[in-house]
Amino acid sequence: MAKRFQFRLEAVLKVRRQRRDHCRRVFAEQLRHVQQQERRLVDLHEQVRTESRARRSDALQAELDMSLLRSRQYYVGHLQRTIEGQEVELEGLQRELEERRETLVGASRELKVIEKLRERQWERHGKAASRRETIEADESSVDLFRRHLEMDLAVHGSG
């Protein structure tokens, strides 16, 4: 009967898979944060463009409302400062994303090492099982030949 394959490091393989999967989830979450931040920046830039167009439109009016122009200018300044802060935050998020990517790559590499080891052991197990089966088949053939020879000798005599 063939021996059942048992990988000695199955527990290590399981832990490394769990770690890799955890790193994937953390990386995906960080990527979502980066994408949200990028969308916020796009929205802020669009608000600046909208306010700038409105300010130019107001400036072309026959009667200038200086308080409106000042408030628009103040708002655009506020938006630009917000953009600068958001860009700094985005850079931090992107650095963290890169760290998460490197951690994920490392976890995947560690898992791959164990998976390759398991694969090689599985192949060795298969070859050994095949050799055992061949030996058993050869022994059965020899036994069968010996029984036929003994029967022939018993029936026909020793010569």
Image (cartoon, rainbow, N blue to C red):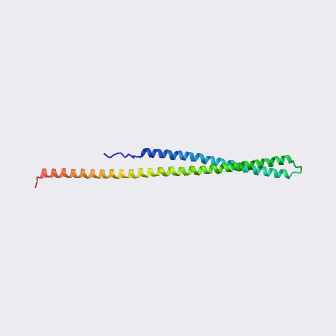
When asked about the image quadrant of residue 26, the answer is: top right
Q: Quadrant of the N terminus?
A: top left
* Left/right of residue 68 with respect to residue 116 in the rendered view: right
Q: Residue at x 53, y 52 (%)?
A: 105
Residue furthest to the bottom in view is 159
Residue 61 at x, y = what percent?
A: 87, 51
Across and down, in percent, residue 141 comes to 24, 52
Residue at left offset 55%, top offset 45%? 25
Q: In this view, does 3 lie to the left or right of 85?
A: left
Query: Which of the pair 36/126 is nearer the observer?
Result: 36
Q: How many marks?
A: 0
Residue 27 placement, left or right of 85 = left
The quarter of the picture where the C terminus appears is bottom left
For the residue pair 55 and 80, the one nearer the viewer reads as 80
| Residue 16 at x, y percent in the picture | 48, 46
Farthest right residue in view: 63
Residue at figure coordinates x 17%, y 52% from the top left: 149
Q: Please name the residue shown 42% across and 51% down the image.
A: 117
